[in-house]
Amino acid sequence: MSEPARSQLPAGPRMPAVLQTAIWIRKAQWLMDTCQARFGDMFTLKMANEGEWVVTSDPGVIKQAFTGDPSKLHAGEANQILLPVLGYNSVLLLDDERHLSERKLLLPPFHGARMQRYGELMGRVAAEEIERWPLGEPYPLRPRMQALTLEIILRAVFGIVEGPRMELLRERLRHFLDLSTSPLNMAILGALGSERFQRFPLFRREMDAVDAPVYEEIAQRRGAGDLAGREDIMSLLLQATHDDGAPMSDVEVRDELMTLLVAGHETTANALSWAIERLCRHPEKLARLRDEVAAGEEVYLKAVVQETLRLRPVISIVLRKLQEPMEFGGRLLPAGASIVPSIYLVQRRADIYSRPDEFIPERFIEAEGGKAPGTYTWIPFGGGVRRCLGAAFAQFEMETVLRELVLRRELAPARPGAEPVQRRSITETPRHNAAVIVARRPCAGSDAPARSRSTAAQPVNG
Ligand code: HEM
């Protein structure tokens, strides 16, 4: 048997790490395209404070990264930048046994079958939001999508809707989340590092203002007589127990709730914005979508969501940091380097997707000669034991919002041409915020849209 090559990082750009990092922050997708054209399916980027990233678009190597031993391939370590907001117990930041243990507790609320329960909530929040939009003038939808997805995740997570405590929490969270995505704060966080940043008095004050009503709600809910009958995620977590029978502590619950809020709203808002941006520029596909959802069909709707997440992934990469030297693609990579499946590059491979740069939802419809998304070639939600816990929730939410939207409103792009991709903290967004011109549909009033099966489901405690 031939020996694997010794500690061989694939080739990559020669420029200093700090320059590579600066380009990455501004233009990650451009950098990956350029490197792939020059170095092939596996190349090395050098990132300031992070070390070497071996970026890959080879489905075989991606499979190996997703199915390899998680104790040797850490993902939590790579997310430490989020520590000040998410806390030490966040599933996103943990590795090894503690990660699996937290993940197990979080899985039941996100089980596919439970999604139907969130359907009514999602449809109702979407309808209220859409009815408020101005008509006949350029209107950037991304900020509205962000407000919408925050409201949905807030209600799904906390279950409560009205009351002064919820109002306070909603207001403080909105303010805090705006602050946490501001480029200035990201830069300070990068410069100080997460441990020092979280002790920074200004940050502490803002975080404590959010935490106070969260802890109050946790205390109140623990003692609530109807806890066992509640469906919201917080109530489910308060009833969950670790393998040794111990319930989750307050701080553990707080950290996971913040994780779900942060991981769950901006990502979904951007994905929805891209779906609208793409559909507006393909009026024939928008018309087909509208006709099919009006007839109660779901196949095209699902394909539109899958194709949007393929062509415009909101997260471009995932990381696994090697805890010991490991072989990938015939090369022995050193401990400390990260293997980095590129969501963006693999989902644009011409040998897997014909006309990869075009928006073609039909490619995912088997009855039309398409193929179901592949586990290692369609990876907008990552994979393996770290695959996004909210994947079913996010897709269901996208479907529900799009359904409400196309049934209630006509949409046209507010600007000619495709919107370029722009980085916003760690997500990729449409540069002009999915600017559209909204018009009322003939005969479409607030009660007009046909209610589908999913929006007729039970409310989630509210
Ligand atoms: C379109 C929307 C979304 C996208 C594109 C997305 C994408 C991702 C990606 C790429 C990862 C990392 C996976 C990996 O390392 O293999 C992830 C992790 C995660 N996501 Fe999402 N996400 C979305 C929505 C959501 C929602 C709605 C929630 C919760 C309500 C959520 C909760 C999480 C959590 C908890 C993790 C950490 C899983 C773990 O480390 O075990 N995400 N997501």
Image: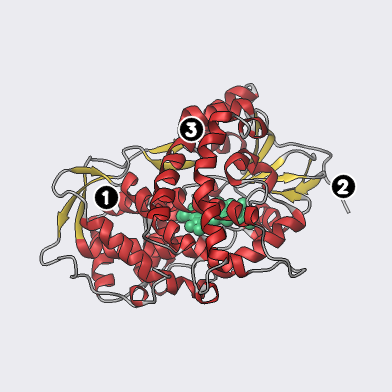
Badge 2: residue crowd in 10 Å (few <14, some 14–19, many ≥20): few
CB of residue at label 3: within 8 Å of ligand 1?
no
Asked if marks 1 and 2 touch (Cβ < 8 Å), the reply is no
Q: Disc 3 designates what residue?
A: 27
Numbered disc 3: secondary structure: helix
Badge 1: residue crowd in 10 Å (few <14, some 14–19, many ≥20): some
Q: Disc 2 designates what residue?
A: 3
Q: Disc 1 designates what residue?
A: 281
The type of residue carrying mark 3 is Lys
Camera-side residue of 109 and 241 = 241
Camera-side residue of 320 and 456 = 456
Q: Give the image quarter of residue 433.
A: top left
Q: Could you give the CA–CA distance between mark 1 and mark 2, rounded to whole angstroms? A: 52 Å
Residue 225, compared with residue 251, is above or below; it is: below
Residue 433, compared with residue 242, is above or below; it is: above
Q: Give the image quarter of residue 32.
A: top right
Residue lying furthest left in this view? 442
Numbered disc 1: secondary structure: loop
- Choose the circle earlier in sequence order: 3 or 1: 3
Q: Residue at x 42, y 40 (%)?
A: 175
The type of residue carrying mark 2 is Glu
Residue 421 lies left or right of residue 194; in this view the side is left
The type of residue carrying mark 1 is Arg
Q: Could you give the CA–CA distance between mark 3 and mark 1, rounded to whole angstroms? A: 24 Å
Asked if marks 2 and 3 touch (Cβ < 8 Å), the reply is no
